[in-house]
Amino acid sequence: MSYSIAHTKRNGQHLKMVVDDVTTLPSLFCTIYILHRLTKNSLGTQTNSLKALRYFYEFYERKHDGRTFDGDFFDKNFNIDPFLKEIDVFFEYLLSGQHTIKSSSYIPVKLLDPSSVAKESYVAHVLVVTRYFRFLNDRYTSMDYQDCSPTEVSLLHREINKKIKQIVKEYNKQETNGTSNTKRYRSLTAQQTVLLNNMLIPSTEEFVDEDSGEVYPESINPQNPFESQFEQFRNYIIHRLMFQYGLRIGECLLLSMESVGPTLPDQNNELYYILLVQNLPDHIDDPRKNPPKVKTKASQRKIRLESNDYTLLTIYKEKRAALFKMKPDVTDHHVLFISSVGDLNPLSYEAVKTCYQKIDNAFIKEHPYFRTKPEINIEPMPKITPHVGRHTWAYMTLEFIYNKLFIEEVELKRDYGIRARMKGLLDTAADELRTLGGWTLSSNMPMRYANRFIEQVANESNTKRTNLITNSSEVPSSSTKDASHSSSSESDIDNTNSFDEDFDEFF
């Protein structure tokens, strides 16, 4: 009475399925759902959805003495209505932790008092199952499968959908455990962002500019937690792309050697550097077990890079080429970010997570006061993760765009007597953010970080804001490994105020 999630690949196409461990066959209706709905999503989203469906299938079989959901759904003539009552019982099953116990029996009692995080994830599992039920209702409550009149089929379909919507509404209202810590924000402050950026600036060797002949001395960053220059450049660039340009981690891992380049000169003979966010070209064979893909069609976009970041990418490409030159027998899959060891395979999501665990540990070691003084900081800094980078970028960019638009509106009011409309400005700022971040037009995510601006204007705003942060960047001169640094923690905080002053002055 157990199920597994199987992963298969053929002709470059990946597919995940829920498989019965006894029969070794995939679930029929679940597979139909996967082929019609989930294959349009990333493999990560597919895995999360199938995990919830796997729990549901195991729950159903335990509760009904070995009968499968697929078999009972078929016996009920493809009518999903009788199964809706299982939703609440499934939620209690998750709350009691029975999904983590290898057993064939179902215990109809609540065993555990779940944490708020666990409860939220269980609600997410329930919502996955409701989407699955809605799909089954849409597909099978039809004239092709129901032996009744068109009017009766239409009425039955609407009634089932109403019940499903009500279930979703109730679970969206689920409150988290009141005794748990409340975390309102999952982003870093401007001060923390500058300190983190400075910690990750790569060390550089002494070099001579071929054009000018100028000699640049070596610059060592004692705070950088990574040893090799290749890792330092690679991780710093990935960090910049997430924290300053708003790329998702999966979008960073999708970049190929062809994703970055200059444009043709414009009418003013100026060049711009463009980053293309899109799925890997068809001719690239991605060897990763869980290859990334863009989240939605709107995620495919062009992002203008500042010249310094393009220079960093150029240096990184040279170091990348040097690694392959040292290992002529390994295959270059032409994915931009690669591992520095072994067969130099494309970097995986797990590898980036490991890097950020190291970054978080190093940052807190350098700046422990952000988490170890609850009497001063009632809301400690969140753990530094790839997705925190996107949250940080979204909050800071929305603030930047909003203030820029607010100044324009104030000037209009001063010159022409036009009243500034706060809500209208926020709507416009959110639309710029939507364009930069690759959200769909129907997505509510941009408004959560707070009807439309063209892509060029949005990129100009992001470039100006990125320049401000770049101008505030400097290699740290010392590390907390030195005894003298421990006494200067508070002064480090004060030194970052210049960034905030520049930020305010710009507005």
Image: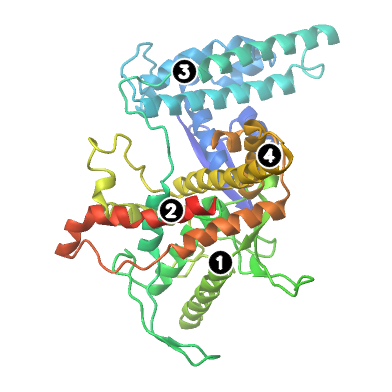
Helix or strand or loop: what does disc 1 sit on?
A: loop
Q: Residue at x 63, y 17 (%)?
A: 73
Few, some or many residues within 10 Å of mark 2 (<14, 14–19, 20+):
few
Which residue is label 3 attached to?
174
Helix or strand or loop: what does disc 4 sit on?
A: helix
Q: Three-letter amino acid code at disc 3?
A: Gln
Which residue is label 2 attached to?
501
Which residue is label 4 attached to?
413
Instruction: Tell me, yes or no, whether the two marked residues, 2 and 4, touch with CB atoms within 8 Å.
Output: no
Q: Nearer the viewer, mark 2 or mark 1?
A: 2
Q: Position of residue 223 (x, y in %)?
A: 30, 64
Mark 2 or 1, nearer chain start: 1
Instruction: Tell me, yes or no, whether the two marked residues, 3 and 2, touch with CB atoms within 8 Å.
Output: no
Which residue is label 1 attached to?
336
Relative placement, left or right, of 63 versus 293 is: left
Real-space CA distance between mark 3 and mark 2, rounded to the nearest whole angstrom: 42 Å
Q: Quadrant of residue 106?
A: top left
Q: Three-letter amino acid code at disc 4?
A: Lys
Camera-side residue of 203 and 276: 203
Real-space CA distance between mark 1 and mark 4, rounded to the nearest whole angstrom: 48 Å
Helix or strand or loop: what does disc 3 sit on?
A: loop
Residue 278 visible? no
Q: Residue at x 29, y 46 (%)?
A: 370
Few, some or many residues within 10 Å of mark 3 (<14, 14–19, 20+):
few
Real-space CA distance between mark 4 and mark 3, rounded to the nearest whole angstrom: 45 Å
Camera-side residue of 91 and 116: 116
Real-space CA distance between mark 2 and mark 4, rounded to the nearest whole angstrom: 26 Å
Q: Indicate how the structure is coloured in the image.
A: rainbow
Q: Nearer the viewer, mark 4 or mark 3?
A: 4
